[in-house]
Image (cartoon, helix red, strand yellow):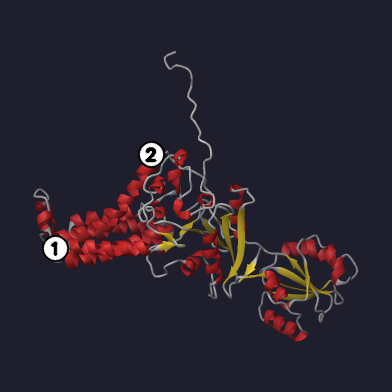
Amino acid sequence: MRFFNGKKKSEVIAFQHSSEDFQELFKKFEESSDFLTYLFPNEEGYIISYFKSLVSSQQVHEQLLPVISNQPKKDIHQLKSDFPVGDIKETADLNEIKELMLTGSIMIQYKKDDKNCLLIPCVNSVKRQISTPESEYTVLGPKEAFVESIDTNLNLIRNRLPIPELQAKEFQVGSISQTRLVVLYIEGITNQQNINTIMQRINDIDYDTVVDISFVSQLITDNRNSMFPQLIDTERPDHLASVLTEGKIGIMLDGSPHVLIGPNTIISFFSSFEDYFLTWNIGTSFRLIRLFAVLFSVLSSPLYVAVLTYHYQVIPTDLLPILISSRGVIPFPPILEAIVLEGTIELLREAAVRLPAKVGSTIGIVGGIVIGTAAVEAGFVSNVLLMLVALAALASFTVPIYQISNTIRLIRFPFLLGAQLYGLFGIALCSAFILSHLLKLTSLGSPYLEPLYPLRIKDFKDSFIRLHFSKQKKRPHFLRTENPVRIRKKTQTQKSQNDIDE
């Protein structure tokens, strides 16, 4: 079923247009240079009008115009059955005429002042070919990624989930852009309350232009002021198909090659979909390495500042001469050199992202080496801190979801400020503030820190660790699915009866 700004299409008020309304609409159309209107096949023929930028000229000249030119002039109602095109509309509704012409239909009138006309779909579809994922690239697994066409993306999902329970509810968002949006879920598995929450928030969107799925994420998220993302942004059809079977919800937007997934927990942002392509013990090891890398990325520089400023007594005796020699000629306190290095890393990151790919990679590598070496030799920063900052930047790249990596980049600076003001107590204070924020944070009403809070031991099977598929007999508890069972019968591994010694 198709929705328009939260209303069914049948509920949209329709009215018969007067000639003045029709002329006013066409006057607006004719102000655009890409709008065409002419008589065909001669001066006594039909009036044909369309936007040439939205219509396939090949289809017009090969399928539509020959039908009109090879027969005597007929009434519009009689002409309708002659075209080899489906979904032809015969209408006098001004709203429907405006909508269909602006989405790639051709209008045919018998005479200029006729209220009734034919609207023939003849869309010029400009689509990008399906390519490999860029932000979620994996060595193993499928190599398909979503594209900007919402119909192509739905095709990719339905090919993976060929079941009638897969529901796609369509909306239109943006009072000006009128962008198509689709909510995906599996009926009988997904919690109905989560579905109602998503649909209500989409209906409440009141914004003029929605051009990307990130707009939708910011408009429907639980806490709009939080730095922590609550909806996962994915470009992998296999990822979306997998989480739909868990009981989650997907949101597609026409024109965006990414799809939103929710609800989520914070652990979901540190789990790569490639973990499921590996054996459970290897996947668990990589997931734990990522979590350790994130903690190191956030805390390494603040700990350096706190220890050298307030708690130098905790430095081991063997390490003390190295720190003294590295900082012997540094004229700045540890906080300043840490901010200089962290700021330099962020500048290099932004420069590498904004520049063309080949130039950006060169700037990132050469710029880091040259600036880092020059800063150490000039005595602005110590080589120990340079190594820590470089390792922290490298550790932040292990995060598989791009959205959470931006959060990790930013929260280092409050920790640095707390370390400078109160030392280790300042780091603990910042940690307490972030933890209290995460305890209150939700994703579509589900706890963000689950399974830690509230504590749910059964959901640990696919959080910090990933157990074997045979151990994941039920769907995650925090999703509160209507059908929690995934494996109904216990599968037993059959071993060979042959003796190895024979």
Residue 222 coordinates in the image, percent (x, y): 44, 66
Dot 2 corresponds to which residue?
A: 281
Q: Residue 357 falls in which quadrant of the image?
A: bottom left
Residue 288 coordinates in the image, percent (x, y): 34, 47
Any part of residue 381 in sight: no
Q: Residue 211 falls in which quadrant of the image?
A: bottom right
Residue 397 coordinates in the image, percent (x, y): 35, 54
Callout 2, which amino acid? Asn
| Residue 385 as seen in the image, left or right of residue 91 | left
- The residue positioned 44% from the left and 46% from the top of the image is 274
Any part of residue 158 in sight: yes
Dot 1 corresponds to which residue?
A: 309
Callout 1, which amino acid? Thr
Q: Which mark is residue 475?
A: none
Q: Residue 149 falls in which quadrant of the image?
A: bottom right
Tag 1 secondary structure: helix
Tag 2 secondary structure: helix
| Residue 334 as seen in the image, left or right of residue 355 | left
- 106 or 179: nearer the viewer: 179
Point out the tag, 1 or 2, that comes first from the N-terminus.
Answer: 2
Q: Is residue 185 above or below residue 433?
A: above
- The residue positioned 56% from the left and 57% from the top of the image is 147
User: How many dots with numbers?
Assistant: 2
- What is the quadrant of the N terminus in the image? bottom right
Residue at the extreme right of the image, as rendered: 72
Given this view, does label 1 or label 2 mark the residue nearer the observer? 2
